Image (cartoon, rainbow, N blue to C red):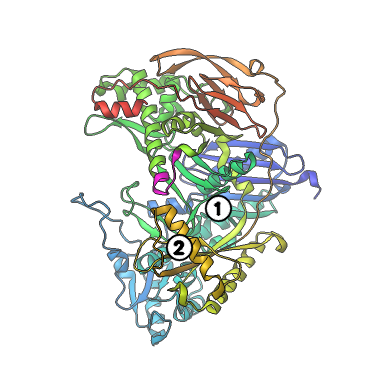
Amino acid sequence: MTKNMSYRLAVDIGGTFTDLVLLDEASGALHGHKILTTPHAPEEAALRGLRELCARARITPAQITILIHATTLVTNALIERKGAATALLTTAGFRDTLEMGKEQRYDIYDLFLKYPDPLVPRRWRVGVRERITRDGEVRVPLDVPAVRRTVGNLVRQGVEAVAVCFLHAYRNPAHEQLVKTLLEREFPDLSVSVSSEISPEIREFERTSTTVCNAYVQPLVDHYLRGMETALAADGFRGRFLLMLSSGTLAAPDVARRFPVRLLESGPAAGALLAGHIGSLIGQPDLVGFDMGGTTAKICLVRDGRPKVTPTIEVARVHRFKPGSGLPVKTPVVDMIEIGAGGGSLAGVDSMGLLRVGPQSAGADPGPACYGLGGTAATVTDACVVLGYYDPAAFLGGAMPLDAGAAREAVSRVGVPLGLNTVETAWGIFAIVCESMAQAARLYLIERGQDPRRFALVGFGGAGPAAAARVARLLGMRQAIIPPASGLASALGLLVAPAGFDFGHSLTGELQSLNWDEVERLFVQMEDRGREMVLATGMPASSVRAERRAEMRYTGQFHDIEVPLPDRLHPGVVPAIRERFDAEYARLFGLALDGYPVQVLNWRVLVSAPGAKVDLRGSSDGATSPEQALKRRRSTYLPDGRSFVDVPVYARAHLTERSIDGPAVIEEAEATTLLWPGDRLTVDGQRNLVIEIGQSTQPTQTTQPTQSQTTAKRISR
């Protein structure tokens, strides 16, 4: 294949839209495409979008050398309980671990507290005679004949997948491996997940939950990937097919099949990677990523050009935004907070007679009222149409005209019980959703010991650029940055993602008395496995590197802190490790406990190869001044004067490195950026829109008589 026929394609399936970006590796040209997601069969939108984008770029799928995919399949399967019929084999006496949980109340004031039902019903949770001690010694041998009989009976009842989680299997996996070998030999159609491979870490409830989640979605993911591979091959695709993991790294399909639970939050992880990539390009390695799509908004912290990765996530919550109400999953995931604030977030009146926005979303089906697809409820997108922030004729570059009349009608209905007119209601919707996102971001950053005012906000996603400047102002930030093709940011993030796999393994002990030879052997084993996985993505061996870390805490505490480690471990490095731990603890909690013993819980290593270098700038259409980029003027609502004002509307593709003072609107095919009075926008050398936030501007308060004065002031500032 010649160089000028080499293309990379990124496909990100979101809750409302599916985003695609095609990169011409010879010229660096980027081609974007955005279509509505098909919730009943997500792959349909992805495949249709691929064909449409290839036709637009005048290429065939055979010319695509690498296809990178992020999907919400696993998240949706766990939320909607659409996984396989799954059984659990565990140590006798521990069959109810999934229901006992941690015996903690996530809301001490809720008298009717609910927890998610276990993914495995009790009749399919079976205790097996075996026992391994915490030191890895076999106390009770595995009853193999009983396992064979038990699984045979489960299969006859319709079980499709089995999770195996024995006590202390992270210390000695022998019994779990015996079961896995037996089941693969005698029940070849059964999907098997063992905890010593999926999550070899202490904390029984989390380890069991993670292994069960993996088994539950494994048949579904295998079927989905086989279908995608077959459909792509039928279209002529012969390149490498890679998937984004929740940790922000790429893996081959076989790895995703073995560890499908690692596909959780793969799309948002890609957006966080793009924020880090942008920061590295402009010399601002510390940023806050703000990804507002159609369904949710995600906020992440980027330090030193990389988003932070945390070892645990919670999914399928009974109350979506209440930690502790869901299923814990011990898998590496980009650390972010997610709130129900997107373009499709539904607006209404709550039980106290106050205006409410989210967390429910109209999604892609039926979508906001203005989509004209059957939706009648008011959303944030409808409010933006009413306020003049979105041009109904230019949405998605004109490919998807919006119904302004339907938007006004939907918003008006919300305002009637509040005594508000249509415009007041629309502004209340927009102001509340921005305030909700700013509050979530502030809490997220403060919990991590960070002052929001120190950072710039990188706004992206289909709705992010419209809200970015206001959210930044509410946070006291001085700058908001809107990257090129901001509405396709997660797909762009896939193009720059590294290949890699993040391992974790428990081997506990006091820092001063560890067997460092044993620890070093553990790291070598994990790194060898990781290297094989990275090479399976097609990366050259010379590019593979390993980064070691440890989860540590003061003995007796519950605050685990991750600390970077040197490349080789031996007793001589103990003082340096202790110093790093004390420094990080002091940064987070204000002081260090000198001389207090330190315990290591888990050892982690990221084996990776760097991603491709992609120029995200695209090309200017040749204008040399803002005047030439001016498309028209549009009547837009400004809260300062509680009135509509004709503001200039600019075509982003024509903007060059000149400044624009707000108020103004900047349009591109997949997103719209808003500047408020007092803001100043410049275009930097990477073609980012850099907005200097006007600190003197104070929007007037929302007129909403049912709001308390304090709440009204907070919403409108």
Identify the residue at horizontal 42%, vertical 49% (top origin): 448
Looking at the picture, how far across and down is residue 617, in whole percent?
A: 67, 35
- Position above or below: 667 against 592: above
Identify the residue at horizontal 51%, vertical 68% (top origin): 575
Q: Find disc 1 in the rendering and name its residue.
A: 248
Q: Find disc 2 in the rendering and name its residue.
A: 214
Start and end of the magenta stretch? 444-452
Is residue 158 at all visible to an observer of this figure? no
Q: Secondary structure at mark 2?
A: helix
Q: Residues within 10 Å of mark 2 (few under 14, many from 20)?
A: many
Q: Is residue 191 magenta?
A: no
Judge left or right: residue 11 versus residue 214: right
Identify the residue at horizontal 38%, vertical 51% (top origin): 80
Looking at the picture, how far across and down is residue 255, in whole percent?
A: 57, 63
Q: Nearer the viewer, residue 529 or 413?
A: 529
- Position above or below: 690 against 241: above
